[in-house]
Image: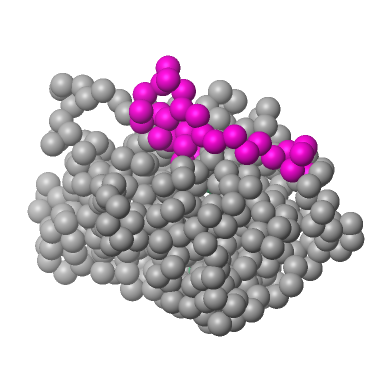
Amino acid sequence: MKKKSFKTKVLTLSAVITVSATTVVFAHGGAMGVIKERMDLMSAIGKNMKSVAAMVKGEVKFDPAAIESSAKSIAEHSTKVNDLFPKGSLDKPTEALPAIWEDWDRFTQLSKSLETETNKLAEVAASGDKRAVMMQFAKTGKICSTCHTDFRLKKD
Amino acid sequence: MSKHSYASGFLALALMSSSSAIANNNDEDAIKRGKYVMDIGGCVSCHTDKKNKGQHLAGGVALPTPFGTFYTPNITSDEKYGIGAWTTEQFIEAMTQGVAPDGSHYFPAFPYTSYAKMKRQDLIDLKAYLNTVEAVAEPTPDHDVPFPFNIREGMIVWKELFFDDSPFSPDPSKSTMWNRGAYLVNGPSHCVECHTSRNFLGGLDRDNLLAGEPKSPEGEKIPSLLISDGSEFSNWSHADTIFSLQMGMTPKGDFLGGSMGKVVTNTTGKMTEEDLQAIATYLGKPVKKKSAGKRD
C-alpha cells in the first residue's frame, strides 16, 4: 500500500473518531445472540455510509482518504453478513424476513455485491475523483435498498 | 455553489431523474409526460411483479389486506387482459370514481381514493403513455377475498362512507410549491394511503392523516410523517428528506426498505428535484434560505 502522508493520517484518524463519537442509536433493544450481532454489524455499516454521505452531500469537507477507509470497512463487514443469518433465525426483535432463506442465492448475491461495490468505492476514493465517488456511492446505496426492500420489514 | 444545489446536482447526476416536460399537446410529449405521471403515481410498485420476474405493468402482485388478498390487474395495452380497449374517459372514470367500464366498483386496495385528486390532464397523459406499453396477453389471478367483503356492491356503501371524490383544491394562502407537494402526497403519489391508520372497515382515519400506522396488514410499521408529534421524521431537515426520498438513505445511515423501498425505487427516486422539494415543503420542511457565510 502507498504510504500516507502525515496529514492524511490525521484526517483519517479524525474521521474515525468523529464517526465513533456520533451516537447513532438504532432501535434494536433487547436483541440477543446472532440477532444482536447482525444488528450491530449493520449499524456499523450504517455509520460508515453516514460518514461518506456527509461528504457526498457536501456537509463536511470531501476527504478521499476517510471515504476509502469507510468503504474498506464496509467491504470487510459485508463478508460477515451471510454467517450471521443462520437458517430460521427470526427471534424478536428481528426485522429479517423468512424470504431470506427462501431465496438464499439472491441474499448472498447481494451481500457479495456489497463487498464488490464498496471495494470499488475504496478504489475510486483513492483516485480522488469526486464525481466517480458520488456515482459509486449511489450504486452502493442501491444494494442496501434492494436488500432492505426484499428481505427486511420494520416492526414494532 | 451552495451546499444545497451541490447535493442536488449530485443527485440529479447520479440518479438521472427525468426533467419535467413542458405541457404540449403533441403526442410524443403527452407520452413523455404520461411516463412521468406513471412514476409519480408509483404504478410499477403494484402492477409489475418484480419478485416473480413479471413483465412491465402486467399485474399479478398479491396485496394482503385484512379482508383478503387482492391481485393487481394487468394494465398493459393488451385489449383482452389489459386495459388497451378502454377509452380515455373510461380510464378517468376508473381512476377517479373507482368504477370499472363494466360498471362494477373497485375495492379500495386500488388507491382511487387518492387518484380521485389527480388532474384531468395528468390522467389523459397517463393513458397516452399506457397505450404505448407493450401488450402482455396474460390473465391475473382472481382476488382471494372471502364473504362478505367479496361483494363488489358492498363497495357502494363503503364509498358512501369513506370516499371523497372532490378534486384537489389548492390552498391559495400557501405557495405554489407547497400546493404541488400537497397534490403529490394526497393525489398521485398516494403517500397518505400507507402513512395513515385505517378504521376496521379499511377507511383512512382522515383526522390523523400521515400520523403513521403501527401495524399494516403485512405487519409493517409505518412511521409518522408529521412534524408535530415528536416523530423521528420531525428531526429531519429539508435536505435529509430529499436525500432519503431520492436515495433511500436516512439521516442515521440506515436505508429505507419494505414497501417504502419500492416507493423510493419506483416513485420518489424518479421524481424531479422540484417535486421532491415540493413534497418536503408540504411535509413542513421548507427550503432553507441560503445563508451568506455558508458556502463550499
B146 inside magenta stretch: no
B180 inside magenta stretch: yes
Q: Is residue A83 visible?
A: no
Q: Nearer the viewer, residue A9 or A71?
A: A71
Picture quarter with the C terminus of chain B: top left
Look at the picture and state if B207 lies above or below A55: above
Q: Position of residue B38 (x, y in %)?
A: 44, 57
In the figure, residue A22 lies in which quadrant? Answer: top left
Q: Is residue B54 left or right of residue B2?
A: right
**Highlighted range, magenta:** B158-185
Q: Position of residue A52 (x, y in %)?
A: 30, 50
Q: Nearer the viewer, residue B103 or A84?
A: B103
Q: Is residue B6 visible?
A: yes
Q: Position of residue B62 (x, y in %)?
A: 67, 67
Q: Is residue B214 left or right of residue A19?
A: right
Q: Nearer the viewer, residue B229 or B33?
A: B33
Q: Is residue B210 left or right of residue B268?
A: right
Q: Position of residue A49 (x, y in %)?
A: 36, 53
Look at the picture and state if B266 lies above or below B133: above
Q: Nearer the viewer, residue A86 or B234?
A: B234
